[in-house]
Amino acid sequence: MKNKNLYLLLIASLISVSALDADAKMTKEAHALYQQACSYEYKSDYNSAIKIIQKAIAINGDDAMLYTKIAGLYSDIGNYEEALGAYKKAIKLRPNDAFIYISIGNILQTMGDYENAYNSYMQAQQIYPEYKYNYLNLANIEYYRKNYKNAIENYNTFLSAYPEHQEASENLANVYYVSKQPDKACEIFSNIYKKYPTAFKDYANYGMALFDTKQFQPAAEMLEKALEDSPNNEAVMAKLALSYQNLEDNQKAYNTFTKLFELNPKLIALKFDYANLLGNMGKNEEAIEQYKEYLTAFPDDADAYRNLGLVYKKMDNNELALFNFEKSYSKDSSNVETKKELALCYHKKQDYVNALKYYDFALKSEPDNFELLANKALTLHAMNNYVAAIEIYKELLDKQPNDRLKQNLTAASIAYGYDLYEKQDYGQAILYFEDAIELNDKEPSAYFGYAQANEKMGCTDIALANYEKAVRLAPGNLEYAKALKEFKTANAKIQATSVKTDETDIKKTNPQMNEQALDYDDLIKKGDEAFKEQNYNNAIDFYTKAVVFVPADKVTMLKIANLYRLLGNNTKAISFYDKILMLDAANVDAYFNKGLVLASQKNYEECIKCMEKVIELSPNYHYAYYSLGLAYEQLEDTEKALEYYYLYSGIETDEKMLNLVKQKIKQLEK
């Protein structure tokens, strides 16, 4: 901050001199001595001037002007105590002289007694509020006292009278900067720099304010100018290095940091940024050294441990990366990036339990993160938790196509199919093999598993066709070729029966088919019994096995879909509703129930499409109108919601439901 003391003392002296003629108490002899002292003062012979004024005071000791003159002379030679004593005598003689108070304030400010300086300036303010320059004194002293709000107010008052005052503008910009308002500081610095480009010198603070507002390019330009004036200014050099780093001018940043640490190797706090730079430049060993030095001084910095872990990760040192990520997590368990890195490290280590734990932690913060969900699915897949993995794969693929995920879903479906096959759950196995084939019709292992499961279910034609398909896709696979040969041998009689007969003859001559029909009826019966007992998983199992015998059994498939919906397995439920609609595009129940599942997933737009299809196929399906009202209400489309609630109330006969809808209508119409 520039000091106005000398300038203000000069003003005070001039005003006092101008008042000399009006001071009737000064004698001619004293006045002559006063003039002689002024001559010595002009020659900068302050001591001689002081001796002359002392003689004048001895002659004329009741004149305030003589005391203000000697006070000014004492101030010029730095004898502030004598100066203050003289000003206090002047005040007794002339108590309403604002400029004496200002002069006292100047001296006290120079001595660092800001509290009394402020009081003196305020006394002057009360006596002579029209004197605008005193606002500058008040602004400066409030700046020193760190009363930034008052300083800003007084600078602005002063500048409203003297808008071109460069130093006051610079001081105001500096107050904004130190009071953490760098944007306002930048605005003022910018205006000053444009008006006075050659006179402007406050490059350091302007550069730092630009840095704090993330204007790194102009910040670097200003800080470079500041270093020209002050080549060893550590604060400027540090901000310049960081500006270069943010501009990704790594070599300049590196050179500036190097010079800075040569000047002062104890700037440990900057070692963190320096280490980050080294890591970005591929200087991994140096980065590690700097992180370690930084962490000895700041052992609780979670970011430093995480970044150190990232360097070890780049060096493919998974163990040390994991160690530092764990340290980071112990210091700050809220950082989602650390959780992600921990999950990836444990995943790489094949510690799937811990990997899954950290994926779940990270997903609490970012529940829709595609990569996190994909990696979680991979972890579940690796843990043989195929059902959970498959559900996530499908949800992600519904959101966006991804070849890698599609391959993973195919692999998980096949693996689970084989798992079910080993557990002799052939009906369910068939469904997963079907899913895999639908995803990738060139995958031989899906056809092979599908063939095996169908063979166990007695569907020999399907089994044969798929064994052959597997062998065609993988002609060099000995296991597939052997299985096909054994199957043909075991079923030679069935394969030989190629003569066309009517359905009655088949039933008479093929006891296996009669047996299957019996199995189908028995499975449906067992499924119905399990449903009545609320043993829904067993019911699904029986119904699924039955559908294998009669793939076009829409009624049983609807039962399966509804049971999955009841159990909350929305993915499977929708899959079966879609299978039904492939067989029967006008199946109202499938559309309606699929719409309910979509609504439970908050996918109201797709739910609306299903319900509209229901109404198109069956205009009196009253619950579809109610469901549409609910969906539009959730989408905050009040007009549409009311439209469907009114339509529903026109065809509903149940009193309880009518009352409920009337209440909804009343609330929406408010």
Image (cartoon, helix red, strand yellow):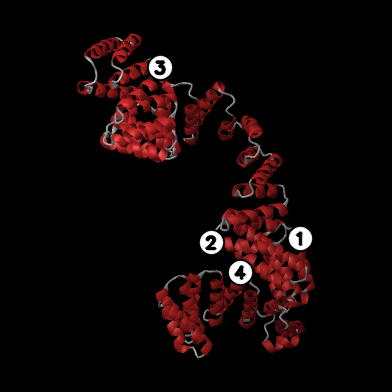
State the image coordinates of residue 45 (x, y, percent, origin top left): 33, 9
State the image coordinates of residue 180 (x, y, percent, origin top left): 45, 39
Disc 2 crowd, CA 10 A, few/some/many (<14, 14-19, 20+): few
Q: Residue furthest left?
A: 21
| Residue at image mark 2 | 399
State the image coordinates of residue 265 (x, y, percent, origin top left): 59, 24
Q: Amino acid at mark 1?
A: Glu
Quadrant in which the C terminus appears: bottom left
Q: CA distance from mark 2 to mark 4?
A: 13 Å
Q: Amino acid at mark 2?
A: Lys
In front: label 4 or label 1: 4
Which of the numbered marks, if any, corresponds to residue 78? 3
In front: label 3 or label 1: 3
| Residue at image mark 4 | 571
| Residue at image mark 1 | 479
Numbered label tally: 4
Quadrant of residue 30 in the image?
A: top left
**Which mark is first along the chain, 1 or 4?**
1
